[in-house]
Structure formats: structure tokens, C-alpha cells
Image (cartoon, grey):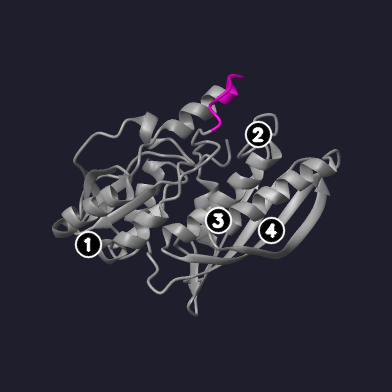
Amino acid sequence: MKRIDKEAYLIRRLRSPLIGDDAAVVEGMIYSTDAFCEGTHFRREWMSPAQIGRKAMLVNLSDAVAMNADPKYALVTVMLPREMKEAEIDELIEALESTAAEYGCEIIGGDTVGGDRLHLSITLISHSDAPLLRRGIEAGDLLAYTGTLGESKRDLEALMRGETIPADSRFYEPSLRRDFVKTCRPYLKAGMDISDGLYCDVNKLLEANNLSLEPTMEIPPVIGESGEEYEMLVAFAPEDRARVEECARESGIELTVFGMATEKGIRYSCHSHHFE
């Protein structure tokens, strides 16, 4: 039986024209939400409550950062396991609040419910005068990603084998590229964060523009299939390449140009990680 991408299928069933970016732009404000669920995104034996709270907030802040937006307010819904102690709840909430505050964001409410597992869902309300969308690419534009990819997949597989990983691992502590996006926004035609792996997210970016890819380098699976990296995937005109590369150097990060958008080319083979 053919396997379908249930996440993509569900999104296609929604009819709003505002859907399609890392967040929805509505009357000058930007709205986003993400879930962070035990058993899907993490296991409690892998992470402290502080690590869980921090990463839950960071992966939500990543959507705002990816759209060149400043997060203002957050609503947090938490499903709390009945056996979770008060000290653990305190640690979780303190990490959520302190991480949000690093980006100028304030938690203003939410909801709580009891359950068998720890699940968090965070909604952000942000603002941008120049949001970076997924649409706007033309044939001939270059595609690139920031930083290095592959660490999140590598360390997740180590955890699955019962091994320990460094406390500063990308799996625990994503690096958000806020300075790069803000500095380089005048030269970026489109972009998004890499949360589902480079293969899948390149496909999403190309599909939003009805284009394909002409690769200029091989992307091995260890890089292309590594989800939850939260690096930036960006597109820009060839004549702006030097400016974008300079923005990356000023931000202290690597930039890898790996392909060109074309009318006829390839799409990567990929699958959703959310239903494994």
C-alpha cells in the first residue's frame, strides 16, 4: 500500500490562503504555533525539564526568526504527567520564560491539562516590517543553507542506542540565525528554517514557487535527512551571492550554496518524520 505524507495531506485539506509559510501574516502581525511532544520529539529520560522547556520554546521562536520577525507574546499549553513533581514543573516553566525573554518575548497565558505524557504547544505572536516568505523565487536563483547539518540526526540516533550526547548538542540546543536573517534580509528572496530535514524543506520551498532544483553539489542522506536542525534555507539572486556570503561571515556562520532553482529539474526523495 502506498504510504502518504499525512502531515502534507492534512495541510492540503485546510483552505485558508494564509497557510504556506513558517507563520501566517495577518494584518501586519505574524502568528505561528508548534507542538513539542514526548514520544515524538523527545523522551523524558533524555532531557531535563529545563532542557525540554528551552528547546520547546526555541523551536517555536525559530519560526519567527525564519520570517525576520520579532516575537512579542507567547501562549503556552502544557499537558502535565500526573507524576511530575512541583520542582520539575518549576524548572520547566523557568526555562520557557527565560528562553522567551532572550528574544524579547513574554508568555501571557495558555492552558494546562493532565495526561500520561509531557506535551507542549506554543503559539507566538510576532511582528515584522519585512517578513521573509517562502514565495518569491525565480528560475536561476541560488539555494543555500547556513551552518552545518547532520548533528541532530547523529545525536538522536546515539540517544536511541542508549548513549549520551554532549550537553551543547544541536539536538538539545538549536542555534537560531537571527542576526544573519536580519542583516541579510534585503538580499534574500525567500527562506524558511530547516525543521523536517534539508531534502523535505527544499521540496517545500520549491513547491511554493512551482520550481525544481538543479543541484551544484551532492547532498548525502546524513545531511539531507537530518531533521530539527533549525538552520536557515534561503534563496537569492546570483548577483547578490557575494553580499549574502558577506552577511554570513559577519554573523560568524558558514553558508553552503548547493543548487539553483530551475523550471525543469529534480525534487528530493523524502518522508515525514512525525509519524514514525
Residue occupied by mark 4:
76
* Mark 2 or mark 4, earlier in chain: 2
Up the image or down, 104 lies above or below 253; here it is below
Residue occupied by mark 2:
47
Coordinates of residue 143 in the picture (x, y in percent): 26, 50
Q: Residue at x 38, y 29 (%)?
A: 222
Coordinates of residue 52 in the picture (x, y in percent): 65, 42
Find the magenta span and give its range.
159-167
Residue occupied by mark 3:
102
Spatial CA distance of label 1 from label 2 is: 42 Å
Q: Amino acid at mark 3?
A: Glu
Spatial CA distance of label 1 from label 4 is: 38 Å
Relative depth, front residue between 21 and 242: 242
Spatial CA distance of label 3 from label 1 is: 36 Å
Q: Secondary structure at mark 4?
A: strand
| Rendered image: mark on residue 138 | 1
Q: Work out which residue is located at the far bottom of the displayed protein and give it.
A: 27
